[in-house]
Amino acid sequence: MADVSLRNIKKSYGKVEVLHGISLDVKDGEFVVFVGPSGCGKSTALRIIAGLEEITAGELHIGGKLVNQVPPAERGIAMVFQSYALYPHMSVYKNMAFGLKFAKTDKAEADKRVRKAAEILQLTPYLERKPRDLSGGQRQRVAIGRAIVREPAVFLFDEPLSNLDAALRINTRIEIAKLHRHLNATTIYVTHDQVEAMTLATKIVVMNQGRVEQVGAPLELYHHPQNQFVAGFIGSPKMNFVKGKVTAIDGMGMSVDFGEAKPMAIPFAGGGAKPGDSVTLGIRPEHLGEGTRHAMVLTGTVDAVEHLGEASYVHVRRDDGTMLTARSPGDSRAEIGSRIPVSTDVDHLHLFDAEGKAFPRHSKADAA
Ligand code: ADP
Ligand code: MG
């Protein structure tokens, strides 16, 4: 059993509180990713779980046991950092075995574990090499191997891929996902990269300024962000935001003035909105296309076009200066400087109130 549970965890450095009460349940075998912008408190939360930082207030349980005062070595965890800090004078084998020697593990048992980890991580041919004779990806795998041999109940990763180049990052990401399927150990992984979070996590925890904004499965966060922060953070390119004012509300939804020729009818109600309220519409680039094919049309001037091959991102500047990104087919003919309409299906819209809270959809014809 290696559940991890955080109950109202607070952390202050001196007078500055950086975690404002984090509560979270990580179930045995889950792969949980903490994601959020730099400085939001992800590493602090992870280091608290590892026992490398003292808890200011709240309770931390690992495997059902209160561990607030338990030293790191007795928590059954192993941590992999961004800077993998291998011992340069030791072979790969010795780097991986080192922690076991320290923990007084039997020599034959240590050898078995190191060879098994090397097998899993495809490091067997490199066991006698020194770290300097390995690629960046191989070094990071050694660092992961060093964690595996300890057979921890909980793996903690802090941005382990940040020092790798783009191609290697994708490969190693896939390796880590496989590793989790293979070992099935509870894993908590910190990253600022939402793509990493989406691809690795069974459960994502979106953090912002020392607070949890939303917890959910990757697609749940993508389809049903509870607020504008999560909506803008999950998804690439980012969700488009368009400001408007509510002009009327009836049983079917609301009319909103978005600065186009006439107000638009959108299928949101409830949420306590009234005429005159400021709202923000959210449209993902993949739901916004050139032309007037869909019910909701916005206009602007083409500012830039990015041809990626399989798709083109057309960046459109509206008259009030706000930018929209539309995902067009790879052969888009959009011309910079031309005035074009872009449109979206109202079923794909998100709507947020002035505080950024998501409105419930009106009908159950939910776009999910
Ligand atoms: P993240 O990992 O999400 O980028 P961190 O957890 O490292 O963020 O930091 C969260 C906040 O705590 C930041 O504002 C950071 O400056 C502050 N912080 C982190 N460590 C210390 C420390 N040892 N002393 C004072 N402030 C710290
Ligand atoms: Mg960090």
Image (cartoon, rainbow, N blue to C red):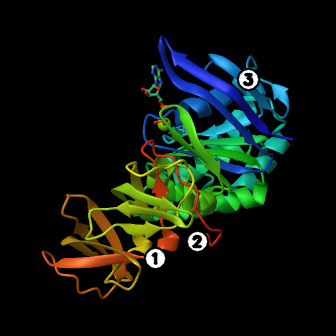
Q: Amino acid at mark 1?
A: Asp
Q: Which residue is mark 1?
A: 345
Q: Quadrant of the N terminus?
A: top right
Please identify, in this view, whether the residue under mark 3 or under mark 2 is nearer the observer.
2
Are there few (<14), some (14-19), or many (20+) residues within 10 Å of tag 3? some
First in residue order: circle 1 vs circle 3:
3
SS type, badge 3: strand
Are there few (<14), some (14-19), or many (20+) residues within 10 Å of tag 2? few
Question: On the rendered structure, is 288 left or right of 9?
Answer: left
First in residue order: circle 1 vs circle 2:
1
Residue 122: x, y in percent? 64, 62
Residue 68 lies, with reference to residue 102, above or below; the image says above
Q: Amino acid at mark 3?
A: Glu
Q: Is residue 129 shown to the viewer in this render?
A: no
Cα separation, mark 1 vs mark 3, equals: 46 Å
Cα separation, mark 1 vs mark 2, equals: 10 Å
Name the residue: 80% across, 29% down. 104
Name the residue: 45% across, 41% down. 355
First in residue order: circle 3 vs circle 2:
3
Q: Which residue is mark 2?
A: 367
Q: Which residue is mark 3?
A: 59
Q: Is residue 42 shown to the viewer in this render?
A: yes
Q: Nearer the viewer, residue 145 or 114?
A: 145
Residue 202: x, y in percent? 68, 56
Count every numbered label the image shows and give the total.
Answer: 3
SS type, badge 1: loop
Q: Quadrant of the C terminus?
A: bottom right
